Amino acid sequence: MKALVYVMPKAGVLDPQGKAIGQALEGLGFAGVQDVRAGKVIELDLAETDPAAARAAAEAMARRLLANTVIESFRVEIA
Amino acid sequence: MKALVYVMPKAGVLDPQGKAIGQALEGLGFAGVQDVRAGKVIELDLAETDPAAARAAAEAMARRLLANTVIESFRVEIA
């Protein structure tokens, strides 16, 4: 069972990578980019076949390792 | 208008970051993790208000800067 964990910097947290991407896009001539936030996506291939258990496992992994919950929020999607 | 660009390593491309995460999860005692792939998500806040035009712009940005299409595939979601 596939689980996707999306990790994004929380609102209000500085995101230098996003800022750099925004400036690079502007430099390349892309207009109208008001804000950019850069995050991670981690695709987990789990042996677990029960969707609820897979979600619980992925959330535990996110809290323990994948996301720094002080400055990042995460969202789990079961596919 | 918000556009989310998901960038993942293509199948068959080595993903050392994903491998490292997989080993770290195993080391923390998480069993049943068969494979891990690590990618990026870029959230763009665009001035564009037409969904089709916003998607086209985000795809152009992904091809030009956000994804290395030799080794990465991308997917755009308009929110």
Image (cartoon, coloured by chain):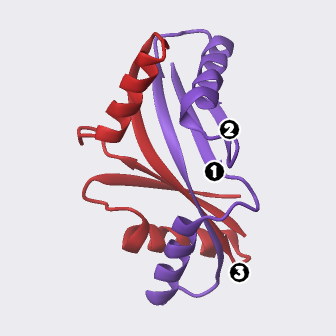
Chain colours: A red, B purple
Q: Chain of mark 2?
A: B
- Looking at the rendering, which quadrant does residue B34 occupy? bottom right
Label 1 chain ID: B
Which amino acid lies under the numbered mark 3 shown in the image of this protein?
Ala
Q: Which residue was labeled with disc 2?
A: B75
- Picture layout, residue A78 above or below residue A16: below
Q: Quadrant of the C terminus of chain A?
A: bottom right
Q: Is residue A30 left or right of residue A9?
A: right
Q: Residue at x 40, y 72 (%)?
A: A65
Pinpoint residue B69: horizontal percent, then vertical percent: 68, 40
To the question of a shared chain for discs 1 and 3, the answer is: no
Position in image of residue A67 (x %, y %) = 38, 62
Q: Secondary structure at mark 3?
A: loop
Q: CA distance from mark 3 to mark 2?
A: 26 Å
Q: Splitting the image into 4 quarters, where does residue A14 fall? A: top left
Residue B49: where, in percent of width, then height? 55, 9
Q: What is the CA distance from the residue labelled 1 to the residue labelled 3?
A: 21 Å
**Residue A32 seen in the figure:** yes
B58 left or right of B73 in image: left
Q: Are marks 1 and 2 on the same chain?
A: yes
Which residue does the numbered mark 1 point to in the structure image? Answer: B8
Residue A68 percent across, percent down from the top left? 32, 62
Amino acid on which the number 1 mark rests in the picture: Met
The answer to whether the residues at label 1 and label 2 have Cβ atoms under 8 Å apart is yes
Image mark 3: chain: A
Q: Between A59 and B40, which is closer to the camera in this rendering?
A: B40
